[in-house]
Amino acid sequence: MERVLERFAAGYAADQDKLSGKGDDQSSIHYPAVFLFIGDKSAEAIEPMMRINHKKWDNSAGVMYFHVGTGSAPGGTTPGLANQEFGKPGSTQGGIREPGADEASGSALLRVSRFTIDAGPAGNDPKTFRKALYHSFYRNEEQLYGLNRALRQLSYNIADYGRLYSSFDRIHLSVITRVDDPLNVFIPEISLLAQSIFAQSFKSVQMDLYALISERDQMESFGYGSSAGVAFLRELEVMQGSDYRFSAKLHVTEDGLSIPVTHQPAPLFDLVYVLSDKNERGITAAHGMQDNYEIICHVSLLKNRKQKEGHYDLNAGGYNNTSFKNNVMTESGRQGYVSAGFSRVKRPNESIALAVLYHFYGGLLSRMKNVPEWGLKEKMSFFGLDPAAISGQAERMVPDGGKIAEMTGMMTHPVSYGSLKRMTLRDAEEALFGGGCEAYFQSNYVQETEQRLKEQQTGEGLRERIRRRLRERSAVGMFGIALWTDEKNGGSVLEAVRSRIRDLAGHLEAEKAELASYYDERVENQPFPKRPLMEKHNVRSFIRFFFETVYRRKLELLLLETELKLYRRYEAELTQIHAEYKQKALELTGLQEMLLHAARASIREADDYIGQNIMEYYGVVTEELMRELEARRGEGVFFGERYMGSLAELLDEGRERLLLRLIEVCRQELLESEAFDQTFEEELLNRANVTTEYGNRQVLSKEELFKKLYRTLEEHAVINLRLLEYTQEHRYEEKYFFGDAESEFIRYAAGADETSRIYKLGVVHEKRSSGVEKLNLMGGFHLEDLMYYRNGKVYYETYVQNGYEFHGIEAERLPELK
């Protein structure tokens, strides 16, 4: 049930994202882009980033993704080249499915290529794994040649998508790794080989590194993981030094000839971004690494964005990479690292879907609980238990009176009328027929009636009638059945049935007593035709009279007894039906509680402000939509076959079946209505004011709303990195909004704090009404400013002292531990 709700909410949110706010557009990247993932731990970032780029960039089909791992990552391959194309709808090659493949248009396809490094004997000793891995790379010429081929194939693939880009002069290469992944020991080799191969096709290669820190994942192996992370950061300090140089025979031809790849004294990467799952305030990110993947994609767009014609950036010039690099560099020329924070404000579609579903279901239940105030006569008729109906059933069970007339032909004992007339009716019957009459009546009436009663499916018939009446009449639902069959409820059908049983039982006893008394009357006192001196005639006349009076009365008594038995059966059935429908009512109420829990849980996951008043506002919206539909199509429309139908029958198929039908109707009839077609600003403003009364001065104005939105975005875009000092010496910041530059909120944000801000503010224009995003960039810190480095240094030193070797390069080339 929970998974069904999750799929429903996620599906609605995804559909809303596809609609992109009824007119949102996408950005385009200017130059080709390649994302190079190094290490098994970085593999998990590939699919999320593909999805983000597919959604954000209209030319994302030409973006290439290259992963270097050991094969233990999801979708790992055998050693050597593995070029895989992801474009067929529903394909899951290599463990990665193309995001939105079924929505992508044209022949542009996203591609993922993998190269698997053979660790060989390096993995036998964890103490020297990282170092041994590094040296084995150089010894395996066949593997190095395979990497050359893979990167060249990647370069050729990029050329196939040249039409998607505005320029082919430059390529943006983004290297992504986890600091604690052993394979990042190859970062200089793989990055420079890729740069060298790409440089044969492009005039320049801009190369950035994104170093990811997952402190959550180090809960189990915090000692070794922290040590490996610090080892990489020491190597990174070397790579980013202004005097860093590199030369190695990495180019390998098909004939086995090696050609050096060289790097002249300069930092290896244009900029290095360090991103953690713990933010600057020391709080673990709610979405884990997902925000960091968003950051990488947004930074890539910021640095490689195609300017839209007819629009401008409100920061007069937009992002300038050279300027940013200069501002994060110290006076001595030491290049600072960069980190970032990301936040998004949009309509909380998942929470809205669950809130509307809850209120829609609540509306259905409230209508079902609105039981009509009928009298007992109407209630009994609803169940088919009124006296006329039960009498009719009894008459159908008891054979007709035709056989009573046939009894006159029964054999009689020779008795004169003179003897009969002084007898009682009882004695006369015995004298004439012995026990024959009673035996005949038992066989032809009593036993036949009992057999028919036995064959009668009283309970199933009553349940079928209830189901049929529930389908026919929406005014009475399961709650009405449960209420009307409750013996504790005054005026219940069960009470009326018991009252009828008491009346019938009393009437039956009285009739039996009267018949017994009648049996004691003398024959000569009975009003049948008598003729003097005609013995035989008088006997036959008495016999006819006897059967038409006594046995007709016995037949009436049998009808009364049958009716009483039916009512007693229905009494027992009603008790069971009450238990069944009470349980159904409890299940319906339980489903409502589950929907409420799911909606509240989803709202809690949203920001306190962005998620405010969702239940209140959408409660009003849902009820208005339901009333509008009822006004157009009639009261009880939701219980018609086109909509929900009988909730009782759906519940008989299981709560999940009921939930699925509820979701289907909610999606079609409510969530697709124009009431949900609002910009995120309008929707948020309406929600903010839903609980205020008309004329209330506390109504939130647009300016106040924008001020709160502005603060919310800023608070959630806190830098994703824990630093020793919050305001370190060389801190430099730039902040960018991604949204519609012509919208009221963006114009407000561009002017907010204009006179007091100490950071550069820019806007990346993307026509949209579904929300706004904010990217905060902060640079200028160094290795020694990282809390992760400070804390991990103790483990690193201890592991080194105990014989662990982490580095492939010579120890004297490493900087001192700070």
Image: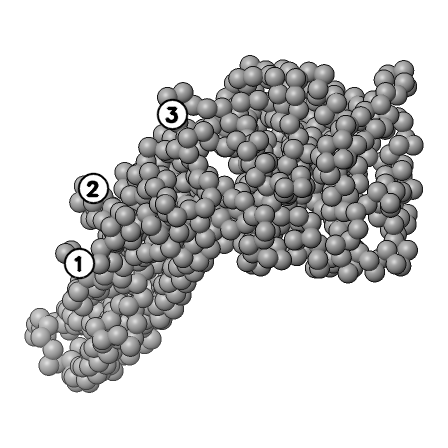
The residue sitting at 74% across, 54% down in the picture is 818
- Answer few, some or many: residues within 10 Å of disc 1's Cα (few below 14, many 20 plus, some between 14 and 19): few
The mark total stands at 3
Question: Residue 633 appears in which quarter of the rendering?
Answer: top left
Q: On screen, 390 above or below 521?
A: above
Label 1: which secondary element: loop
Real-space Cα separation, disc 3 to disc 1, in angstroms: 40 Å
Label 2: which secondary element: helix
Residue 311: mark in rendering? 3
Disc 2 designates what residue? 633
- Answer few, some or many: residues within 10 Å of disc 2's Cα (few below 14, many 20 plus, some between 14 and 19): few
Looking at the image, tell me whether mark 2 or mark 3 is earlier in sequence order: 3
Q: What residue type is labelled 3?
A: His
Looking at the image, tell me whether mark 2 or mark 1 is earlier in sequence order: 2
Q: Are marks 2 and 3 in contact (CB under 8 Å)?
A: no
Q: What residue type is labelled 2?
A: Arg
Q: Which amino acid does label 1 sit on?
A: Asn
Disc 1 designates what residue? 696
Real-space Cα separation, disc 2 to disc 1, in angstroms: 36 Å
Give 558 or 459, whichever is nearer the viewer: 459
Label 3: which secondary element: loop
